[in-house]
Amino acid sequence: MLTPRVLDILSRREMENFLERIDKLSETVIISVTDPDLKGIDESFLAKAEDFLLVKFWDVDDDRDPNHLPISRETAREIAEFIWNNKERKFLINCEGGVSRSSAVALAVECILRDFGNRHEFCLNGCPSIIGNPRFNPNWLVFDRIVEEFVSLKGEVEKILRGER
């Protein structure tokens, strides 16, 4: 287990090999990231978890190439909602290489669930099992967008609770 909430960060191939060998994952959800031009992991494998989210976006951190755009705000919000809705479960996360997008998503899981989206607290508390691990190279734009969308959602919910909406 990498963190109290993230069981592991895997490549697509590692995730497929793992899911082939098991029948069911209890109390675990999967976030699977793939390139927009690829099929991704078969949903019958992903369905072995309690729940899963399959998203597609490029592993880029700018929008200079119109053919390879970074994670959209909509996709980041979808991931943030999925993380929050599964806060009592463990996460398995994969992307094509298991290095950049998936590690950024794992960091977002920790920031959202441990520090309620507070990046300052997250920086103070750290996450050395991911940030200090040479196996991972997080895409910080992915992390930032997911956490920003969570903070936005949190603000909307707080307004509703105060009767402002």
Image (cartoon, rainbow, N blue to C red):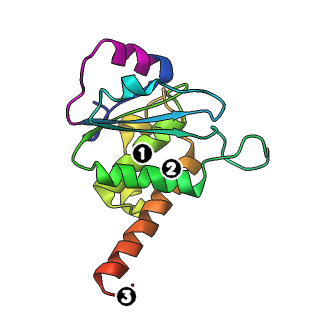
- The image quadrant of residue 52 is top left
Dot 3 or dot 2: first in sequence order is: 2
| Residue for badge 1 | 107
Give the residue at x 39% y 63%. Answer: 118
- Check disc 3: other Cα within 10 Å, few if <14, some if 14-19, many if 20+: few
Give the residue at x 62% y 27%. Answer: 38
- Contact between marks 1 and 2 (CB within 8 A): the answer is yes
The amino acid beneath tag 3 is: Glu
As helix, strand or loop, the secondary structure at mark 3 comes to loop
- Residue 58 place in picture, x, y as percent: 64, 38
| Residue for badge 2 | 143
Q: Is residue 117 visible?
A: yes
The amino acid beneath tag 1 is: Leu
Q: CA distance from mark 3 to mark 1?
A: 32 Å
Give the residue at x 42% y 61%. Answer: 150
Q: CA distance from mark 1 to mark 2?
A: 7 Å
As helix, strand or loop, the secondary structure at mark 1 comes to helix
| In the displayed structure image, the side of residue 140 where residue 22 appears, left or right | left
Give the residue at x 21% y 47%. Answer: 88
Q: Nearer the viewer, mark 3 or mark 1?
A: 3
- The single residue placed furthest to the front in the displayed view is 44
Q: Nearer the viewer, residue 44 or 109?
A: 44
Quadrant, the N terminus: top left
Q: Which residues are magenta?
A: 14-27
**Tag on residue 164?**
3
- Residue 63 place in picture, x, y as percent: 74, 50
- Residue 31 place in picture, x, y as percent: 41, 37
Quadrant, the C terminus: bottom left
Q: Nearer the viewer, residue 62 or 119?
A: 62
- The image quadrant of residue 154 is bottom left
**Magenta stretch encompasses residue 16:** yes
